[in-house]
DNA sequence: CGGTGCGTTGACATTTCTCAACTGTTGTGG
DNA sequence: CCACAACAGTTGAGAAATGTCAACGCACCG
């Protein structure tokens, strides 16, 4: 019988939330829970795409390796998110590599063959996938928009203003889901530039920053920056 | 009866190529051919998404307007391409604005209501859409990759190396689907920087460049640049 | 402890942008 | 058909942003 943990995780995913239990069980039959240590590689760019994944706990980064050895992070993912569906549905190989970034990282691996069989046999699943692919598309369009912002200050401000946050206005706390080094790479700047930006904004009392989170004191100022209304802060 | 031009265009689209004629006719019944002049706006960011479009001839750019009046081009599209399906399928409003860039630009406007009715009633269509959405996702991932390349030389080289081209090795001709001004924006640099790059590479006999196309004389050198192996050329 | 790697800071090099001037092309109205 | 305006494209000079290199403190882990 299918692992109840697998079923529970699958049923909480945006793709599958609306699916009948019977379909979930079919997909669950080809899935299993897996656990990775930080730094472990799930798959590499170019590998045949045998499965896609859902994150129960921890984090995963998707990246591409350039010929000169550096790596370019395409996406950073956390609990409740899925990845590599497109590779399973349409491509024969993974277009990027995936690495666990936390210890432990718990995933559900959904077997591609089983999934494709259910997918081909039942239209309800394909309709559900269309919705989630559209959302993914939108988030990538916003990523492109972010990356084309002129200067690094605008990119950082834009990023901060879209992260989920807690706290009252005037004291909004934004949790950083990754290290500052990785955040810098995500925003296409060097760690030094990021550090200096945070410093400068801190000195002006626009933000406070500690390891793992940023507190926004002057959100108006930040939004102005994200819209390119000032040179760089 | 459905306009035969509409039907012919629809049947040549990647999404619909594999669809039965009967389905195409249903979708075609809610579609019509339209013609735009260069600079005309098809829809604006935030408008309710009543239709998506397929390009028969001409060109379209999708862009977002920033608060300070500049516009950021998200995508440039040509004949055979479609856009705004995701807005129709999943979102209630267009996430970006669209403008015709050539004179004349001929489009097929596919009515959202009709399309959604067919989409919901027939699983073959949703399966077809999944495939094309996956391709769209992949192309956006590559766009993100391109934009995160360190320097402008690498971005331009990367762009040139992925454009469709004609001619024998050593004399590859790449047609530019947009003005150099727009290409510069696409690659997130200023027109001046683009001009200077082309000039420098021309002086070194790596390329030749005229209005509307670039001839690649030394592809190896360009690939090295795209991989960040030299400072900037 | 000692090592490893992140984050910070400073000095300096390089890239890229900005501003301004100039050219050539195109399209328009007289 | 011409004069002219509008605009893409080019070039130069100087300014600003960002990257590079090097040094250091600090936390975390074995």
Image (cartoon, coloured by chain):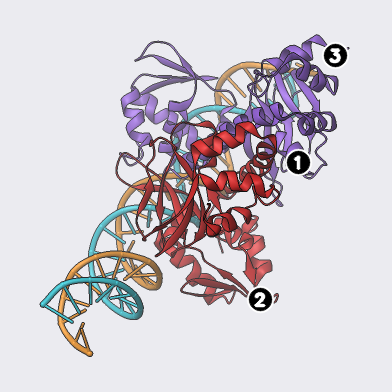
Chain colours: A purple, B red, C cyan, D orange
Q: Residue at x 40, y 35 (%)?
A: B48
Q: CA distance from mark 3 to mark 1?
A: 26 Å
Please state which of residues B8 and A202 is positioned toward the viewer in this rendering.
B8
Mark 1, secondary structure of its residue: loop
For the residues labelled 3 and 2, the Cα–Cα distance comes to 56 Å
In the picture of the structure, the residue carrying the numbered disc 2 is B167
Residue at the front extreme? Answer: B1
Question: Is B130 on the left-hand or right-hand side of A206?
Answer: right
Q: Are marks 3 and 2 in contact (CB under 8 Å)?
A: no
Q: Residue at x 45, y 67 (%)?
A: B196
At horizontal 35% and vertical 23% (from top left) the residue drawn is A219
- Circle 3 or circle 1, nearest the eye: 3
Q: In the visual, does C9 lie left or right of B134?
A: left
Give the residue at mark 1: A94
Does dot 3 land on a helix, a strand or a loop?
A: loop
Residue wearing tag 3: A2
SS state under label 2 = loop
Q: CA distance from mark 1 to mark 2?
A: 31 Å
Could you say where residue B44 lies in the image, as x and y percent from the top left? 37, 42
Q: Residue furthest right?
A: A1
Relative to B62, does residue A19 appear above or below in the rendering? Answer: above
Which chain is indicated by disc 3? Answer: A
């Amino acid at each position: 019988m299918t692992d109840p943990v697998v079923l529970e995780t699958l049923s909480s995913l945006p793709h599958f939330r609306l699916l009948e239990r019977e379909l979930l069980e079919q997909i669950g039959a080809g899935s299993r829970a897996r656990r990775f240590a930080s730094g472990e590689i799930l798959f590499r760019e170019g590998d045949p795409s045998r499965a896609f994944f859902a994150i129960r706990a921890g984090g995963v980064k998707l990246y591409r390796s350039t010929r000169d050895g550096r790596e370019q992070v395409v996406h950073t993912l956390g609990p409740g998110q899925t990845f590599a569906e497109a590779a399973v549905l349409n491509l024969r190989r993974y277009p990027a590599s995936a690495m666990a970034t936390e210890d432990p990282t718990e995933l559900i691996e959904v077997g591609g063959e089983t999934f494709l069989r259910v997918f081909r046999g039942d239209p309800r699943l394909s309709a559900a996938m269309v919705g989630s692919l559209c959302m993914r598309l939108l988030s990538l369009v916003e990523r492109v928009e972010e990356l084309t912002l002129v200067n690094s200050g605008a990119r950082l401000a834009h990023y901060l203003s879209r992260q989920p946050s807690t706290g009252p206005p005037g004291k909004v706390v934004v949790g950083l889901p990754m290290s500052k080094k990785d955040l810098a790479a995500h925003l296409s700047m060097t760690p030094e530039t990021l550090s200096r930006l945070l410093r400068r904004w801190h000195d002006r009392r626009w933000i406070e920053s500690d390891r793992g989170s940023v507190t926004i004191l002057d959100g108006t100022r930040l939004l102005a920056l994200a819209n390119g209304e000032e040179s760089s802060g």
